Amino acid sequence: MFQIFKEHKGFGKQIFLLAKNELIKTYKGAVIGPFWAVIKPAFTLFVYWFAFSVGIRSAGNVEVIINGEFIANFDRFIFMLVGFIPWFFISESITQGAKSIRINRQFVTKVSFPVSTIMTYTSVARLFVHLFLFVIMYVYVAFAHGVSIYNLQFFLYCPLMFAFFVALSWSTAPMSAFSADFENMIISIMSGIFWLSGIIYNSYNMEVDLLVFGKPLKPILEFAMMLNPINFFANGYRNAFLYDRWFFEYPLELIIFLVEFVLVVALGIYNYNRLRKTLPDVL
């Protein structure tokens, strides 16, 4: 960990400039440039709104029940909107973070540059887009749902989300540089991860009536959803902007996430230090 911090020391300005350049490079040649970073998620949200509000009209509102307590009925679009905003950042951070070393190999093979900062500025570039989308979301939610002190939890969830997926990229980026199969595996499972996370449905109250060995499956699934860190952030944003709940009101979910966070950081440090010295030869 000290090695990674040491590599970042004195590179704050370079990380910011490289993150800015990362966005410019991504949309180079497009007339509207970085605005595609907003158009793409906006179109995705429109498709889901049309599917659930127009195509599948029976979907109706989302009834949120947590631990047997009725919270409220929410318009399905605003419910999905608050879940999609962190998802856009998470999905981009996972996929772009995994390929960050490979597509920026010049910093590893040709110049003396701290390798760990590559994953950082890649995530910072995604964070710029996330903050812009968040402002749009917040304006919409403020008009529809109002403003409350619970909204301040954004300043907890957003930095935690950024740190978690930067730490995850400490493992995925070096491993993807060693094997293109690992990167392809990550890309191929992202769609499945989306549907297994509570982005468009309420994971606190799973509508399942199945029995397994005579026991109801519902509580097992609801606990399994708590093990998904993506679900933690989707629910965290909804707790802050829709449910009006503090993060300490659900200690089990928070403890599970913190344990996973420590494990991801420890695994990231181990993999990064194990592989970084051989990266120039591999690339």
Image (cartoon, rainbow, N blue to C red):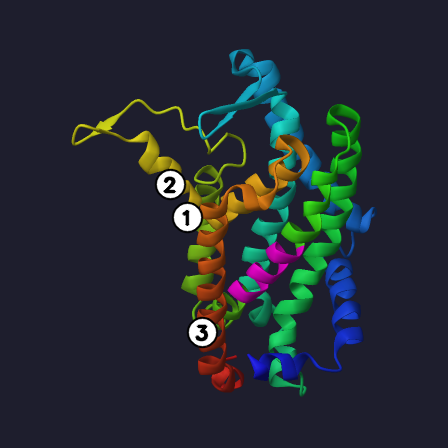
Q: Quadrant of residue 2?
A: bottom right
Task: Decide whether the magenta segment is chiefly helix, strand or loop.
Answer: helix
Give the magenta-colored segment's residue range: 159-168
Give residue 52's mark: none
Name the residue located 57 percent from the left edge and 50 percent from the top edge.
91
Please tell me whether residue 189 is drawn above or below residue 23 in the rendered image.
above
Q: Quadrant of residue 99?
A: bottom right
Is residue 164 toward the left or the right of residue 183 in the image?
Answer: right
Q: Are marks 1 and 2 in contact (CB under 8 Å)?
A: yes
Q: Residue 48 colored magenta?
A: no
Q: Is residue 193 visible?
A: yes
Residue type, numbered disc 2: Phe
Q: Quadrant of residue 40?
A: top right
Task: Answer with mark 3 or mark 1, whichever residue precedes in sequence.
Answer: 3
Please tell me whether residue 283 is drawn above or below residue 74 in the rendered image.
below
- Residue receiving disc 3: 178
Counting the numbered discs, the total is 3
The percent position of residue 64, horizontal first and vertical second, equals: 53, 25
Name the residue located 70 percent from the left edge and 62 percent from the top edge.
124
Residue type, numbered disc 1: Leu
Cα distance, mark 3 to mark 2? 35 Å
Label 3, secondary structure: give it: helix
The percent position of residue 174, horizontal first and vertical second, equals: 50, 73
- Residue receiving disc 2: 223
Name the residue located 44 percent from the left edge and 28 percent from the top edge.
205
Is residue 178 toward the left or the right of residue 8 in the image?
Answer: left
In front: label 3 or label 2:
2
The percent position of residue 116, horizontal first and vertical second, equals: 60, 76
Label 2, secondary structure: give it: helix
Q: Are marks 3 and 1 in contact (CB under 8 Å)?
A: no
- Residue receiving disc 1: 227
